[in-house]
Amino acid sequence: MYRFFAPVVAPILAAVEARRVIEVGAGGGQQSAKVAQWCRGHQATVDIIDPAPGFDSDAFQARWRDCSRFHRALSLDVLPSLLPADVALMDGDHNWYTVFHEFRLLYGEGETVPEDAPIAICHDVEFPYGRRDLYYDIETIPPEYRHAAAPGGLHPMVKGIAHEGMNSMMCNALLEGGPRNGVRTAIEDALEGRRDQFRIVWLPMLHGVAVVVPLARLAAHPALAAVLDGIEPQPALRSLIKIAEQERIHGLIARERLALLTGTLGGQAPPSEKGRRPFTSGLGAEPWRDIQRGLFTQTYKGRELLLSPFDMANYLQLLGDLRPGCVIEIGSCRGARAVWLADAMAALGLQPRVIAIDIAPPEDLQHPGVTVLEGDARDLGGVLTAAMLAELPRPMLVIEDSAHTYDASLAVLDFFDPVLASGDYIVVEDGVIQTLLESPGPAGVSQAITAFLDRRGSDYEIDVSICDRFGYNVTNNPNGWLRRL
């Protein structure tokens, strides 16, 4: 929200000659510093509320002690003691419960808005959290106000959790829309029946900002109307802004996807101190890129099959050698690999039994040898119970192909560690991203393999006969074919 300070926030503070400012949600402190600096120059004060700021709040307070106060607490616990104020900058917990009750504190619950009610400038009123809850700490939300939620990507074209989306490490409501869901919905609900007592300017860029101005403030400060007129987009410009915002969001999604694959987004492990096989591939980056381009045109029974020719051969050989009683696939995408594995098992004279688990499983996958389950790689105990696992026929082949992050892959490895028996396999997919991007360090999934083997390597081996069948680590899963000893 700090990017709105110069064009939106500062002109409004000046127009109303603000003396008391509240900031809810400090984040990394960029906006807090700007507001404190403005307050110092205008004989004003700012109260900053954040239970877990991403910066040294004590050092901040020491620098700005003459014009700021810091409250390490939840907004709903502190706001009542800080009102009335002139302007409230709202960028805290982005869920309906919190924002609805924040606005009820700012504007009361009666039919008439109090004359001293503040202007509220509220962030995240558009995608992704305008109509979907985010929970920084879901335990602070009463159960009756929570939506089903889990970490997972968000995409503007997907109402549920997307295979490729943004904010995939956050605890997001599983579905967008509907009652009591999202920041914008909370604002609308809190002001229901009193909308005619406000002028609201909706700015549909950078995840959206709502400028909520009580009419009493407009009447008391004539210069404010000109400021609002200047920032409110006309219809034609609003449409163009929305197009640009969609393009920006797609860029953010692509950037996050790249960061997840390379292990540079959250939950990253330190490099192992033990000597291990490098995760690079003997096949260079350019050939791998050509192969990847081909994968995106490959289908099996009408479904995208993102499986390299090397690993199609590797899986076929492993199915024939291991003759698994069951295959458990974590991350099924469109379901093509699950169907292909089941058909391959049948062709080899095996009883097909593939369990495909995904946070957003394909709804149209129907195959007698495939069981589709909804589940989160980071919480597999919620879908694979001990009793269910005990009944599965052996040997077992597990394929970890979920979020391609360090924490997700390590969670899968740790979950199956006590489940796997001698001779069983677990395959960790897509470490080849290091070679594809010519990255100096291993991908997140490869870091997870290293961290796991650092602890449990005495009970596992990297099956180099598979990894190196077509050349050193000529597989999408370098050092990722693990056999339980």
Image (cartoon, grey):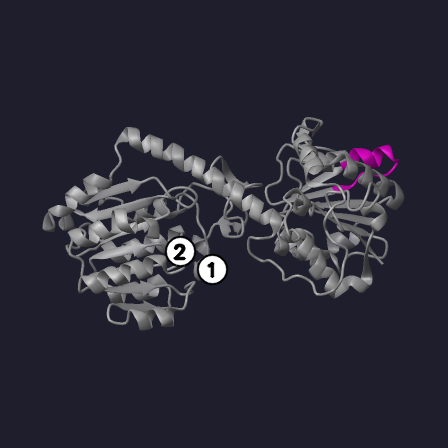
The question of residue 431 being in magenta is answered with no
As drawn, the residue found furthest toward the top would be: 302
The numbered mark at residue 421 is: none
Estimate the x, y position of residue 82 in percent, counting from the top left.
Answer: 25, 65
Nearest the viewer among 367 and 323 is: 323
- x and y percent of residue 133 in the render? 44, 49
Give the residue at mark 1: 137
Query: Looking at the image, is 35 positioned above or below residue 312?
Result: below
- Residue 49 appears in the picture as rendered: yes
In the rendered view, would you say 133 is above or below 272?
above
Element carrying mark 1: loop
Residue closest to the eye, 272 or 385: 272
Per the image, the residue denoted by label 2 is 93
In magenta stretch: residue 344: yes
Q: CA distance from mark 2 to mark 1?
A: 9 Å
Give the mark count. Answer: 2
- Identify which residue is drawn at 69% across, 45% down: 432
- Relative horizontal placement of residue 260, taking residue 91 as reference (left or right): right
Residue shown at the point (69%, 61%) measured from the top left: 451
Mark 2–mark 1 contact, CB under 8 Å?
A: yes
Question: From which residue to which does the magenta span run?
Answer: 341-354
- Quarter of the image holding residue 126? top left
Given the image, on which type of amino acid does mark 2 rest? Asp
